[in-house]
Amino acid sequence: MNQTKLSLGPILYCWEKGDVEAFYEAAKSSTADVIYLGEAVCHKRKEILIPDWLELAKMLKVAGKEVVLTTLALIDSNAKMVDLRKAVLNGEVMIEANDFAAVNLCYEHGLPFVAGHALNVYNAETLEILLKNGMTRWCMPVELSREWLTNILTEANARGIRDQFEVELFSYGYLPLAYSARCFSARAEKVSKADCETCCIHDPVGKLVETQEAEAIFRINGIQTQSARCYDLLPVLSEVAELADYIRLSPLGLETVDVLENYREKLNNPLYSGETNPMSCQGYWEGTAGKEIAGESNHTNR
């Protein structure tokens, strides 16, 4: 049986509280090894608060799951620092640091952490610094390739640190590409960010954006810009499993639990050789334009 573990990343969208609870009730019975909870995008999303997340964490831990509490990817105000401090000092579960403010807090309090994909970690030297600050697991930035990952791990091995951290790969979901101080969802609804009334709750997998030629190009999710196509590394699963200790799936709805079970089945099947979903993309993994599908590229965009 393959030893690579599966994780469910944090919900990146603003869902109704009942939908969040239903998702984690389903996740509790899944074969996920690790489940991430918490708010990574916008501190104004208050359907679920930190005490609620910690109650969900208790339920999932009883079911045998490892639980990690994620943190905001953009800390630019005192109010967000207050939320961040509450998350880091929760006293019950490890956190995922998505901003270096979270890394600093973990270091100050001697707390281990997962380095999230929102951190700009592009070389083994940075990984070594994060290790000294308490990192135990690193989730690679989504725009990096298989080749880049291989080179980083080779460099980490040369530095004698490869066995000191685990590697996690964002492998399924709409890719989080960028964050802004502005709220794109509010702008689309012609309201201000201050008075948005969390209008993003009406777009449970973000709002699709098309070019003037009607080509799907992005999804907007509050302050977050995402890929239009769903990233899915199932076609190259054997390559991913060779390099990663954890394969992360980003929740898009209850059906994501079924996707995770499909990943599990394929991981446990030594004869599985990959399958291509024409609605997905794997370009970044191949080192090409992110929107491309595995096997389609002529590699002119390297």
Image: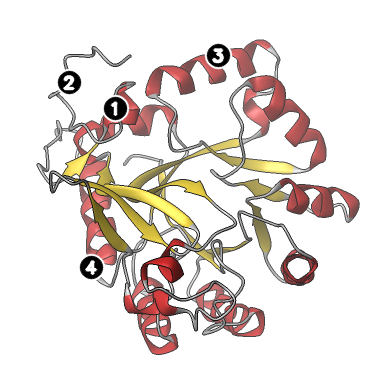
For the residue pair 158 and 71, the one nearer the viewer reads as: 71
Residue name at image x 25 percent, y 49 percent:
230
Cα–Cα span, label 1 and label 4: 27 Å
| Disc sitting over residue 3 in the figure | none
Q: Answer with left or right where residue 122 lies relative to residue 292.
A: right
Which residue is tagged 1?
289
Identified by mark 2, the residue type is Ser
Above or below — where is 140 with respect to 111? above
Q: Position of residue 243 (x, y in %)?
A: 43, 28
Above or below — where is 26 with respect to 89? below
Residue 24: image quadrant is bottom left
Label 3: state its secondary structure: helix
Q: Which numbered disc, 2 or 3, marks the residue closer to the eye?
A: 2
Q: Answer with left or right where residue 302 lies relative to residue 151.
A: left
Which residue is tagged 2?
297
Above or below — where is 256 with respect to 118? below
Q: Which numbered disc, 1 or 4, marks the residue closer to the eye?
A: 1
Which residue is tagged 3?
154
Identified by mark 1, the residue type is Ala
